[in-house]
Amino acid sequence: MSVTKAPAAPREPRPDEPPVRQGRPYESARRYARWLPVAPGTVLLLLFLIGPIGYCVYLAFTDLQLTGQANASFVGLDNFTRAFGDEDFVNAVVLTLVFTLVSSIIGQNTLGLTLAALMQRASKTVRTVTGAIVICAWVVPEIVAGFLLYTFFHRRGTLNEVLDFLHLPDQNWLFTLPILAVSFANIWRGTAFSMLVYSAALSEIPDEVTESAQIDGANAWQRLIHVTLPMIRRSIGTNLMLNTLQTLSVFGLIWAMTRGGPGNRSETLPVFMYDQAFNKALIGYGTAVALLLLVVGGLFSVVYLRLMREEV
Amino acid sequence: MRPTAPLALALSAVLTAGVLTGCSLGPDDDPNTVEIAFPKDIDNNVTVRDDYLAYVAKQFEKANPGKKVKLVPIQAPQNDYYTKIQIMMRSPNTAPDLVYEDTFLLQSDIESGYLQPLDKYLDKWDDWSKFEDTAKQAGESEDGKTYGVPDGTDTRGLWFNKKIFMKAGLPTDWAPKTWDDVLEAARAVKKNVPDVTPFNIFTGKAAGEAAAMQGFEMLLYGTQDQLYDEKSKKWVVGSEGFRDSLEFVDTVFKEKLGPHVSDALSPDIQTQVMTDHLPKEKLAIALDGSWINQQWIKTGGAPWPEWSETMGVAPMPTQNGQEPGKTSMSGGWAWSIPKKSGNHDLAWKMIETLQQPENAREWCIRGSQIAVREDVARDRKYLNAIPRTKFFTDLVDVTHYRPALPLYPRVSEAITVAMEKVTTGDATPAQGARSYDKQVRSITDGAVIKR
């Protein structure tokens, strides 16, 4: 997916391009022959990606159930109108936004940038060790991370052991503030990605620029706001977009830690979707919610793309 | 002819299709192998069913040379097991040949067309006449055909730890007459033996059907109300019994008479109670099934030789002691053949092997089941195998069955949601009951009757 698009300038025709009006017959044959190497891949894509996606879109307009129903029928927009009147769906949307804002946009993003900035100045050893530790959290499979953090936050888990040792009051966030617990878990797990993106972006900034800003009397804060951030703006956009889309679809982590509970206090859209489709057996409704989740992701992407396009 | 884009695409489509059909996607659809899907406990030490099936499989392979049995254990919390087998049964590529169905789901899965009617086999099977009628009904659908062969049934009641009761100053021949007596006993334990959990009742979404049946319905069916009104053929909403039952759940968790709420809502609570809380004597009273002692005998996951001296049993009383004074719920499991299995005859042969009288008896003993075959029910070896069998068998006189209807599983789910809201304190019993009513109206398209 290309995200950085320069404004299109009128293009010079490339010398090897066939003229618009076709000349000799083999020219067109050659143009078609170029399709050959791409064709198998295209077919596979159609088969395995577009096919199921199309089927999902179709299912969202039916009342298909996993069990207890002889035949599914087409119900038009019923599933969607039902979603907007369903307080549990509204709850899931709110929780999804909270989860995305806290864990991705604020958490992973800021922490990743901070780590990257600090590591730039650090010695090689510190950089290697820190990088290794942070990346470790990122490479463990999602479900493993989920269980690790479940045992960390559990009422009788590691965190409380530590708090007891320090004579601090206990917590039971998995139960009292589950959405916060899973948000922390997601920050712990996903910061590495942002850190890598920002490390790369910061190393691209030429030293001369920062030095000249320094000579002009800019303090560290001003340098960050007026020099560094504008120069890595595109990376920020890209990172935010990838992070947000990834966070919107987090399922395993939450499922392992809280199963969306207690009640529905940590039931974000993916968990809600699963619950409707598989626990309540409403495949059609669950699929409709999945499409709505896609729309939420799309809206976020559009916003980021616009942000990245504007010239500073 | 010139090669063109569509042609190139078509050509590669043919190629990829060839590649795809070349590799088989599903399990081996070998006509000589019978694949059996069954739930495996999330606790790896619990292998009661696995061992029993392996034991019968060996016999089957010996009796039918050249035929093989492939066990497909599905290790998951019970609710996820149901989902998994439904998804498997949707496609001929993944459908097992034999599936273990909880009877509460049977009607729903029959309605979905997942299961094969067994009448042509049952007609030629003499043993079928030995099954009790109530047990047969679980697998019968409205079209009059039968879709499942039950291998046992169960009842539910109160298990209590006599040692803890002595410490708490309670009688060891405890026989509560009303719900309040149950709560009073739990309060006495809380006061006098503070380091144990006084009372466990299953609740919430994760425990699923265990919460709906062992928990909620054991209460509701001891009131004047039920879930479904047979006369009008409608689901009941707004009943006082429903609210009172939620009120009971609310009291247990508000007064901290039950396990810690986060433990009560965890998906492994059922296994925990059977293999840890009760045998380790951390729990005084459990409202639970007749089968849980299967874990304490020598084939179980938590052998506990002293259990029969330590554990007492009492029937669950009706709400205010009204007639008949006690109540129970019965369910059970059945063997069914998925329609898309493509190996029906061999699967049936396996059911016959499982239901040979000795094997049926073996399961009733290992699984601590109430026999559904008259010959097994009279069998001395079965009757004397496990203490308390008679107590739980006698509860059949006052027992109730869940509405055998395709919609039941979804109604049951709505019950667990209401229970969870009340348990966490997110809703009062009245609010929980209202949210249930709303759910049931939507599930049944308004076919409800208000009490």
Image (cartoon, rainbow, N blue to C red):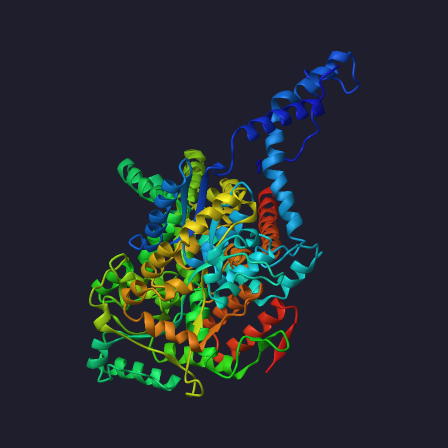
Q: Nearer the viewer, residue B162 or A139?
A: B162
Picture coordinates of residue A233, whole percent (x, y) = 52, 43
Q: How many marks?
A: 0
Q: Nearer the viewer, residue B157 or A269?
A: B157
Q: Nearer the viewer, residue B198 or B121?
A: B121
Q: Quadrant of residue B297?
A: bottom left
Confirm whether residue A186 shows in the render.
Answer: no
Q: Residue at x 35, y 45 (%)?
A: B59
Picture coordinates of residue A23, whole percent (x, y) = 79, 13
Picture coordinates of residue A307, whole percent (x, y) = 58, 46
Q: Nearer the viewer, residue B296 or A56?
A: B296
- Compared with residue A60, is residue A236 higher up or lower down, i.e. above or below? above
- Compared with residue B450, is residue B48 higher up or lower down, i.e. above or below? above
- Compared with residue A215, is residue A111 higher up or lower down, i.e. above or below? below
Q: Quadrant of residue B379?
A: bottom left
Q: Residue at x 55, y 74 (%)?
A: B435
Left/right placement of residue B263 relative to residue B11 reads: left
Q: Quadrant of the C terminus of chain B?
A: bottom right
Picture coordinates of residue A208, whole percent (x, y) = 43, 34
Q: Quadrant of the N terminus of chain B?
A: top right
Confirm whether residue B360 shows in the render.
Answer: yes
